[in-house]
Image (spheres, rainbow, N blue to C red):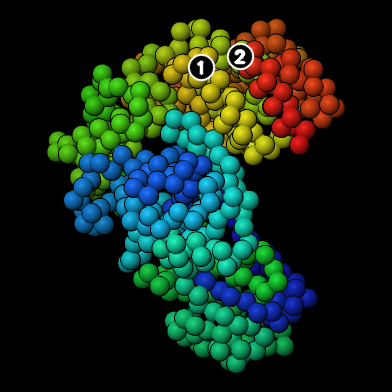
Amino acid sequence: MLDISIKPLLKVVNKPAKALDFIKKHIVVVEKIDGTKLTLIRNNLPFDPRDYSKNWIVAYKGNVIYHSEFFGLEGRDSDIKKSAIGASQYKFVHDHLRKIHPRAASIPCDTEFFVEFVQNKPTITRDYHVKHGLFLVGFGPSQYAQSRGFVFSASKFSNDLKLLEEYRKILQLKPFPVVFDGTLGSKSSILKGCIDQSLKSIFKKNINDVDFSDSMSIIDFANSAFSQLESSLGGPAEGVVIRVEDNENLIKVLSADQHDKAVRDAKKARYKGTSEQEDAYWKEVNRLIDDLLNGADFTNTIEFLGGLSRTVYSTANVPDHPVKSKINVQEDVFLTAKLRILGTGSQGSSSVAVIPMAAKPFHAGHDSLVRQAANDGNDSVVVLISTRGRELITAEDMIPLWRDHYIPGLLRQYSDKIVIRFSESPMRDATLIARGFANRGKSTVVRVYGGTDSTGQSDAEQRVALILQKNPELSSRIVAASISRSQTNDVSGSVMRRYASTGDSKSFMKNLPVWLSNKEKSKIWQQFQE
């Protein structure tokens, strides 16, 4: 996904010399919006003016949000706007894309847009009066790989502000409100630069007490004022983002309570009952999902989710919750059911294999683990691929290889038993899968597979020990499945990276999965030589 990490003002401008330079420069300050960070990808398919869903991928943290997920929500917009706290609100994103799509033909294929979506959510601290707006943060040319409900993309962030504005108008996305445009060097320049009247009032309140001969004092004063901004959406703002002339790097100032744990906990508590009530509620939710998914056909993801949406959002008899509304409960049921199926590929499982791996690159040793897990009779085999890089190989380097070679090959070889997921933290997701089965009250065992290193130490045993150290209640639900080094082709990622760096093509290609053709192996080798 697009990486737009922004450093705080007081960490960037932290010395008198830097402060003196900063207050002389022209800055443009916009309100920072606290919402859900979505990815919109214009895919590589030919433009279809009649069906936006053929050309757009919508994702949140790599989880694809399909248009069919809202088939059961027709006529419930007012209910969503008033009460929703979950994924039903993404209906408005798809509605927007459907509306603007006919005018989007000029947008190049493989372009990723990073969008802030204003929604109500227990984990978002701001309580805006105006919700469900879409704000364009940035864009860039993208390459991506998809696998059953998940997408992993990598984009090169573009600094073309003119093109950014052109795309914003085409997509009819909102601009971030400009609150200040000027310099901070003097009292008159500060007041002149204020565009937002509430910000001007904040500056005026204490500006006569500022020592304008002390550049750090000016920075502290400006930082304090920006952190008190009122949002254009109503209520306290999240903060501001500052763009400095002749500098591509952005700077931020956040509201003082944005990372206040007490504030976040208070927001979450509004939608929670006691621990006993929550336990009882989720048992009922999972019991309902068991009934909904019993005998369901998961072959076609889009069709399955469409049918599930129609059923869930028309279900009147949903579990009771002490504070959540009916649509909140329906959101919980739908999303939990969706993630259960897409996350493990199976409903009535008695055993699920989980194989966490860095896979930089994916080699014959990894394939041996997958083959063993498939042969062990597991109902599904979940391969968790790290989205982080390793020495010499970035996660982005792997995207075209997964898209063009590895994912198609694994599915050919092992059919739909294989679930391939890209993950920021494979071990965390392995834990979540095991915990998910535990919460359902099922006797399913999650087997974590791994090989042994040169000393005979088991990756799987070490990983399971770490999981159980933090989650002892999972001791009967998650076990290690170790495969000896001799069974995994006695090859490792570090050895493969050494072959690539030293130009040893013969050894490198010899240790790729056997189900790849010689032509595919050659293409993979060439990828690492570019």
Front position in the image: 397 or 286: 397
Task: Point out residue 49 in the picture as x, y percentages from the top left corner.
Answer: 37, 49
The residue pinned by badge 1 equals: 412
Q: Is residue 167 above or below residue 154?
A: below
Q: Quadrant of residue 497?
A: top right
Q: Quadrant of residue 491?
A: top right
Q: Are marks 1 and 2 in contact (CB under 8 Å)?
A: yes
Front position in the image: 484 or 227: 484
SS category of the residue bearing label 2: loop
Task: Point out residue 199 in the picture as x, y percentages from the top left corner.
Answer: 48, 81
- Apparent side of residue 411 relative to residue 458 in the rendered image (left or right): left
Q: Quadrant of the C terminus?
A: top right
Q: Is residue 525 visible?
A: yes
Residue that appears at 64% across and 37% down: 395
Which amino acid does the dot numbered 2 rest on? Answer: Trp
- Apparent side of residue 449 relative to residue 508 in the rendered image (left or right): left
The residue pinned by badge 2 equals: 515
- Apparent side of residue 519 relative to residue 33 in the rendered image (left or right): right
Residue that appears at 44% across and 19% down: 416
Q: Is residue 331 above or below residue 204?
A: above
Which amino acid does the dot numbered 1 rest on? Answer: Arg
Residue that appears at 46% across and 16% down: 415
Q: CA distance from mark 1 to mark 2?
A: 9 Å
Mark 1: few, some, or many residues within 10 Å (few <14, many ≥20)? few
